[in-house]
Amino acid sequence: MLNFRLLNKLREEDFAGFDPFDSLNSRLLSATPFYKNSFIRLAWLQLGKRSPINLRPLLGVPRRRNPKGIGLVISGLVNDYHRTGQGELLAEASELAQWLLEERSNLDEWGHSCWGYHFDWQARAFYVPAGKPNIITTCYVARALFELGKVTGNESFVAASLDAARFISRHLYTEADGRCFYAYIPGESAFVHNASLWGAAWCGFAGKALEDETLVEQALEVARQSVREQLDDGSWVYGARHHHQFKDGFHTGYNLEALNLLREAVQTDEFDECIAKGYRHYVETFFEPDGTAKYYDNSLYPLDMHSFAQAIFTLLKVGGRAEDLAFCEKVIQRAIELMYRPSTGLFIYQKTRHLTNRINYMRWTQAWAYCSFSFYNRFRAEFEHASN
């Protein structure tokens, strides 16, 4: 199957690779005084992200493992185990999970399990050094460790995953500008819906598992903030700042998947109307009739495998009906037609109207493709079994 071919390609690279945002790992740049300049760091990072030619080998950027990418691979391995029963998949996932435990951000500094990226990252408003924990990486790693820990009975994986919610609650809960939310990184006050909602989903889930109602109530309070800011048509802009006033497909999918996880974890119908309205807008807005996943609400391009992969999760986890499965299969077919390269066994990064970027990105593209296809295969097998 295609997902196993992709898994084998990841194995060949020991689950390491390049990333759209890893250009600041350049040995060439770090050897110069220019690295200290935030404008140069931002321009350098954008050069690496936007160039269709992979400059990283020339610039001395090494292939590395990424904690979020490894979390996605672990979730994919667990999905494949549930479908096939192959115990060696769990053994492989457990080795990767042990690596994640060793890669936690400084426990002495943060006091709880948390994870960041393996590269320095320069945004418009702030600079994030490698290893500084962020909410998205922490949530995806925690979910993977919990899934694996439960199926293998490894309590150290489960404990680390639930402890991550303590980090989110303690270090990322923010009250600013009349809002309450979970910030993307400690000390930052930008309000971004998908980051805040993923934090709420994991804190609600962990709060229930830990029987910590204070954690649950905080998560619900945070989620309500984003629910209140949902627009009348069911959409969300990316965030609160002036340069965040755009709407894209995969972040909308994150919002809906996170709200759905929170809803299921705390067994509430409070978010049903919000999710239903948002899901209807998502399906009607972010796809072409043939199943092509759009990047923005008002633009098809760039075509990005990330958009297709998140669509699989959103359609099956938030939708989950027979018609959603049928449409998901159209999306998968278009992803293969537009983004897959049979000659390499890998998916391309992006296509614009005029250019194709074929750079092999482990976290952003291949890990997402593998995890989403593994989930689809598992969902379809379970759906067919339940229908018989």
Image (spheres, helix red, strand yellow):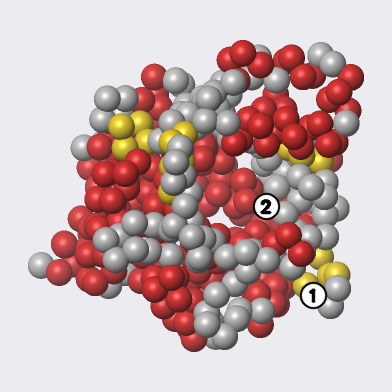
Q: Answer with the quarter of the image where residue 87 lies.
A: top left
294 or 2, which is in the foreground? 294
Q: Answer with the quarter of the image where residue 345 lies.
A: top left
Circle 1: element type: strand
At a point 64% along the width and 19% down the height, the residue shown is 61
107 or 153, which is in the foreground? 107
Task: Judge from the rendering whether residue 218 lies leftward or rightward of residue 13; answer left or right.
Answer: right
Q: Which residue is mark 2?
A: 135
Residue 80 on image: x %, y %: 30, 43
Query: Label 2 crowding class (10 Å Cα cut-off): few <14, some 14-19, many 20+?
Result: many
Viewer-nearest of discs 1 and 2? 1
Sequence order check, earlier mark of 1 and 2: 2
Q: Distance from label 1 to label 2 (Cα)?
A: 18 Å
Tell me, yes or no, if residue 33 can be seen here.
yes
Q: How many marks?
A: 2
Where is the C terminus found, in terms of image quarters?
bottom left
Circle 2: element type: helix
Where is the N terminus found, in terms of image quarters?
top left
Labelled disc at residue 119: none
- Looking at the rendered structure, the kind of residue marked 1 is Arg
Labelled disc at residue 179: 1
At a point 49% along the width and 86% down the height, the residue shown is 273
Question: Compared to 165, does 321 lie above or below?
Answer: below
Query: Label 1 crowding class (10 Å Cα cut-off): few <14, some 14-19, many 20+?
Result: few
At a point 75% along the width and 34% down the height, the residue shown is 43
Question: Compared to 127, does 180 lie above or below?
Answer: below
Tell me, yes or no, if residue 118 can be seen here.
no
